Amino acid sequence: MTSRAGVNSRNPTISDVAERAGVSVPTVSRVLTGAARVSPAKREAVEAAIAELNFRPSAAARVLVSRRPQTIAVVAGNTSRYGYAETIRGIEMAARAEGYTVMITVVESADEVEVDRAIGATLSQALAGVVVLKFDPPGVAALRRLSTDLPVVALSGTRETGVRQAVLDETGAAEELTDYLLGLGHRTVHHVRVPPSRRVDGRTTGWRRALLKAGAPVPPLLDGTWAPNSGIAIGRVLAEDPEVTAVFCGNDELAMGVMRGIADKGLRIPADISVAGFDDHPLAELWSPPLTTVEQDFEGLGRRGFELLLQVVEGSGGRRFSSELPRLVVRESTAAPRGRGT
């Protein structure tokens, strides 16, 4: 338990109140805002903790009981990567059109303390609802910690049960991309994975499903990081294996790194090895050669997610799930195998 000295040395937070009262952060938020009923015993414990810690809730929380909030919180593990930034832009544009403002909370890791800190700071505001970008472990952890009393929508590439959700069907798109590469005549397709949000992501699932359906060998997974240059070393390794003729990378930046590594070994793309990416990053069509990829409408994902949330906020019910299949974009980085590995 947080010591009195530790709390008094700084301004107490909603998380401190929850710890002192022995309840969850969402319970404290409900007491402060009156947004939902709380048992008398829990209310008394929270009020006692507030008095003991001399906690002063934010002005936004105090006005929540008197008018409908006009702020949407976006909870994300990152804001600078292409997919994250475009999704947040879609949310913000749709929210602004409806008269809502957007606040962003970054959850820097899936560590329980970090997640509680971020969620506590978010719930101390007067919110109409929350959109969670469930693209990575921090996003998954944050979604689990959010109160179900507050309207919540998750955005990702794989479906999550028990929550309103807008998704990009990464599994279906990855399966289509792998089918395309196999259809060119490649015996199999190697896969360089970006860090998954859970044990297996949709892109990897679709890749494996297509190979198994075609009766093609399933090569061992190769793990990249979010840093594009992590693909360089992987590309060099792949170039040393004469059996490798086609590679599907988990995103375009990683694919660019892999292409660089392959070129470092004196091989040509796609004459020796075909390489495909995922996401359709703005640089993908400008790369040399232009990159075959899957176009993911991240901005549209953000808009669809906000629309689902708005239906709940305004009490109109509506759909709980929205899905869209990303589009395969064929460019010059892929071709039929021309002797290597055949």
Image: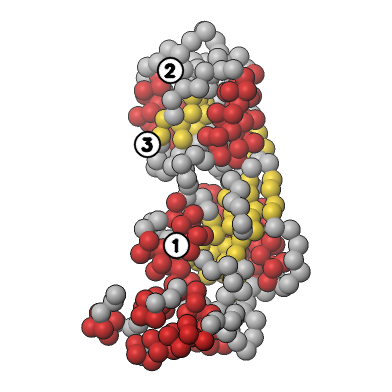
Residue 57 image point, x, y percent: 45, 85
The residue to which callout 3 is attached is 230
Q: Position of residue 214 (x, y in %)?
A: 62, 19
Task: Choose the circle earlier in sequence order: 2 or 1.
Answer: 1
Helix, strand or loop under label 2: loop
User: In this view, which residue lies farthest toward the left?
Assistant: 5
Marks 1, 3: nearer the viewer: 1
Residue appearing at x 48%, y 85% in the figure: 41
Tag 2–tag 3 contact (CB < 8 Å): no
Which residue type carries mark 2? Leu
Residue that carries the numbered disc 2 in the rendered image: 267
Q: Looking at the image, is 224 positioned above or below residue 41?
A: above
221 left or right of 207 in image: left
Density class for disc 2 (Cα within 10 Å; few <14, some 14-19, many ≥20) is: some
> Where 194 sits versus 138, above or below?
above
Q: Residue at x 64, y 86 (%)?
A: 67
Residue at 60% in and 40% down: 170
Q: CA distance from mark 2 to mark 1?
A: 41 Å
Q: Nearer the viewer, residue 197 or 162?
A: 162
Which residue is drawn at the image coordinates 40% and 16% (left, top)? 241
Q: Which corner quadrant holds the N terminus?
A: bottom left
Q: Is residue 79 visible?
A: no
Rendered position, 58 above or below 149 = below
Mark 1: which amino acid? Val
- Identify the residue position indicated by label 1 in the image: 106
